[in-house]
Amino acid sequence: MKNNILLGTSNSGKLKEFRYYLKYFNIFPNYEIRTLTDFEYIGEPNENGRTFEENALLKSIFFNKKTNLTSLSDDSGFIVHGLKNYPGIKTAREARRLGGEKKVIDYIYSKLNKLSEIDATFICALAIKSNDEEIICSGKIDGKIINIKKGHRGFGYDPYFIPLKQYKTFAEMELNEKMMVSHRFNAFKNLSNQILSGN
Ligand code: ITT
């Protein structure tokens, strides 16, 4: 019987990218991929960690406990250097609180209206929890945010973020283009290296 890996996220944009990277880096090639929709509603972990890494780990521990399957989770978001690293681990919560991603961007612009460019860094922490091991790693990408929506691909803040040395937002890029430069690419690359080196 094949082993199973549960992709512990309810974000469909992340899920698509998880599948892409597992294949690209040949991680868990002989595992059957499971998602939360394969189960009756499991509930959600309380994301009360202090860092992206802590939150990724507590998500993967939660899903491993609930299903007994090896579980992969991600905690991600962006930080604005000029704004004490806002919104950070609250990136998703701030969009819910203010009424959408654009509202978060507008809020950031209202605070930093004197700057011609707003530097930001996207961060992705990944955690894997199985019954006998724990792996945590992360990746990031520097860039800038813009306050006009550009592009329609991807998810979340993709239309508002231009990586360094690029001229397109993540949402204007072809899927493969974003996949090769994003914070999540760097995190999966680190994950793949950790797995290859036996942690
Ligand atoms: P799960 O916890 O179920 O995985 P979530 O969407 O709640 O889903 P997070 O708490 O990690 O996940 O929040 C991540 C936030 O950062 C969320 O608002 C995303 O839209 C945003 N985000 C993360 N990666 C992104 C990417 O590659 N492109 C655009 N936005 C991204």
Image (cartoon, rainbow, N blue to C red):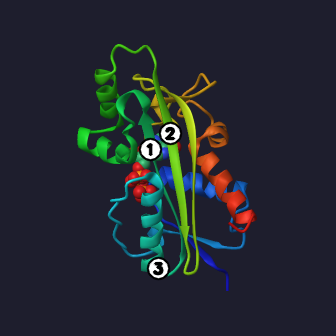
Which sits earlier in the primary sequence, circle 3 or circle 2? 3
User: What residue did someone put label 2 on?
Assistant: 122
For disc 1, does the CB lie below 8 Å from ligand 1? Answer: yes
Do the residues under discs 1 and 2 have CB atoms within 8 angstroms? yes
Do the residues under discs 3 and 2 have CB atoms within 8 angstroms? no
Within 10 angstroms of label 1, few (less than 14), some, or many (20 or more) residues?
many
Kindly identify which numbered label has been placed on residue 67: 3
In the rendered view, does 162 fall on the left or right side of 42?
right
| Discs 3/1, front | 1
Q: CA distance from mark 1 to mark 2?
A: 6 Å
User: What residue did someone put label 1 on?
Assistant: 77
In the rendered view, does 73 fall on the left or right side of 85?
right
Which sits earlier in the primary sequence, circle 1 or circle 2? 1
Q: Amino acid at mark 3?
A: Thr
Percent from the top left, x then y, of residue 192?
69, 58
Q: Residue at x 54, y 57 (%)?
A: 126
Do the residues under discs 3 and 1 have CB atoms within 8 angstroms? no
For disc 2, does the CB lie below 8 Å from ligand 1? Answer: yes
Q: Amino acid at mark 2?
A: Phe
In the depicted structure, whether residue 124 falls above or below residue 87: below
Which sits earlier in the primary sequence, circle 3 or circle 1? 3
Percent from the top left, x then y, of residue 162?
54, 28
